[in-house]
Amino acid sequence: MALSFMVGFLFWQGKASQALIQASLNNANIELTRASLLNIFWEEGLSQLKESGFFPKNLNLEIKDTPSIKATFILSEEKYRLNLNEAEEKDIYALLVALDFPPEKAREMVDCLFDWRDPDDFHRLNGAEKDYYLPLGYKPRNGNLEDFSEITLIKGFEPYIFWFKPGLYRRVTIYGGTKEFREDFKSTGDDLIKLHENEVYRLELSLKQGKKTYQYLEIFRYVKGERHVLFSRAW
């Protein structure tokens, strides 16, 4: 098994890391493989943070074996994303249109989101209230979103468009973020990130093993060198 771990021009290779990954591969358990890779990426990032004061936003690893593995770790700052609990209607609408949603679809999504959040049962023009959701087995929050995956329960925010295409989850948050839509949005900030105590960050792990691709998302608060997870999802 040939293992190479590159960060920019840095070549990194360690027997302990190889053994950890090989054990997970032999176990044929994708959850163990994911956890092993995530631990390796995180520890490598912390090592660079200690040496330079910055955490690299992008780490890549390739294992040439049968089947081969390619993994990518991306760290970004949550503060650049639009907060769906705090942004005004015009800003959420502007974001959706910028992501190429048709205006009528964008308006429906905005109305349904605000119907989900507001405390009353009155329908907005294109919205949905509990009479729509009760046959589905649940009712609207009538308050702020409390869990990131809750968004996909809202009419118009189908799981496919949220998690896959166009992947709305990449641009929005309920953990910090900003209240205003910005056309010059950059999800990852600078090439190198300085982790600040108690700030919220997001990591994404993409793992391609043979012909299969796996994704992992984690939103966390950075506290004393550790990740305090606020939300995670694997698919």
Image: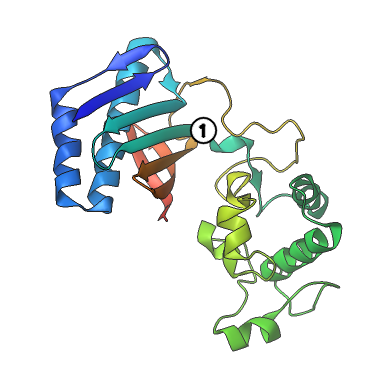
Q: Which residue is at a point 41% across and 48% down the rendered structure image?
A: 213
Q: What's the coloring here?
A: rainbow
Q: Is residue 129 above or below residue 219?
A: below
Q: Is residue 115 above or below residue 200?
A: below
Q: Say which quadrant the C terminus sits in.
A: bottom left
Q: Say which quadrant the N terminus sits in.
A: top left
Location of residue 184 by image quarter = top right
The x and y percentages for residue 161 are 63, 58
Query: Which is more toward the observer, 118 or 75?
Result: 75
Location of residue 54 by image quarter = top left
| Lateral position of residue 115 relative to residue 212, left or right | right
Q: Regarding mark 1 in the picture, which secondary structure is present there?
A: strand
Taking the image as drawn, is residue 222 in sight? yes
The x and y percentages for residue 170 are 59, 45
Query: Which is more toward the observer, 218 or 165?
Result: 165
Q: Identity of the amino acid at label 1?
A: Ser
Q: Is residue 141 above or below residue 37?
A: below
Taking the image as drawn, is residue 147 in sight? no
The residue to which callout 1 is attached is 76
| Lateral position of residue 44 relative to residue 149, left or right | left
Q: Which residue is at a point 80% across and 49% down the rendered structure image?
A: 97
| Lateral position of residue 180 relative to residue 163, left or right | right
The x and y percentages for residue 195 are 44, 26
Q: Which residue is at a point 81% across and 47% down the rendered structure image?
A: 94
| Lateral position of residue 116 relative to residue 176, left or right | right
Q: Which residue is at a point 38% across and 42% down the rendered structure image?
A: 207
The x and y percentages for residue 61 are 34, 29
Q: Is residue 167 above or below residue 105?
A: above
